[in-house]
Image (cartoon, rainbow, N blue to C red):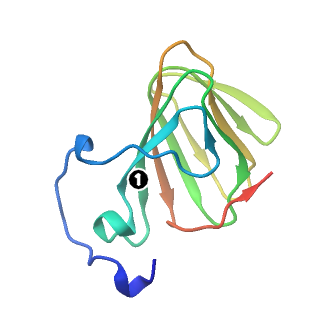
Amino acid sequence: MNPSDRPAAQAFVSNIAEIPWQEFPGHFGGALSKALVRPETCGSRRIDHRISSYQPMAHVAEHVHRVQEQVYHVLEGVGLLTLDDRRVLMRRHDYVFVPPGVRHSFTNQGLTPLVFLVVTSPVEDGETPV
């Protein structure tokens, strides 16, 4: 999107139900997200905030961000997070900070949907699949 085409940032209140589910590139098997705060949704310049719901076995492929920082905050379910060569089981109320340059992926290893928040800054990076 051309920066001049983006909406001007304004304060707003919205409901998650108003935003459609999407399966972003690199996400598979029912790894769905709702892009709540992004340049095209509200004019944010530095923040990408999503809620994600992964069905059992759904995952995001392993990748690395060049400049983006990310936070994943688990609300429900159980997921297996990889951080370089380390594997961590993430449960409700667990959160992780992923700095640039860390190879990572996230897979629903549980029996119910894995629901988590994702906050990313800056918005664009050009992530690199591994």
- Count of all numbered marks drawn on residues in the image: 1
Report the residue at 19% width, 51% height from top.
14
Q: Position of residue 5 (x, y in %)?
A: 35, 82
Please give the residue where the numbered disc 1 appears in the rendered image: 49
Q: Nearer the viewer, residue 74 or 56?
A: 56
Residue at position x 55%, y 52% in the image? 70
What residue type is disc 1 on?
A: His
Position of 28 with respect to 94 (left or right) is right
Q: Nearer the viewer, residue 37 or 71?
A: 37
Q: Quadrant of residue 76?
A: top left
Rendered location of residue 71, percent (x, y)? 52, 46
Q: Residue at x 75, y 48 (%)?
A: 103
* Mark 1, secondary structure of its residue: strand
Q: Is residue 67 above or below residue 31?
A: below
Above or below for 100 versus 59: below
For the point 23% across and 46% down, the residue is 18
In the rendered structure, the answer to whether residue 91 lies left or right of residue 83 reads left
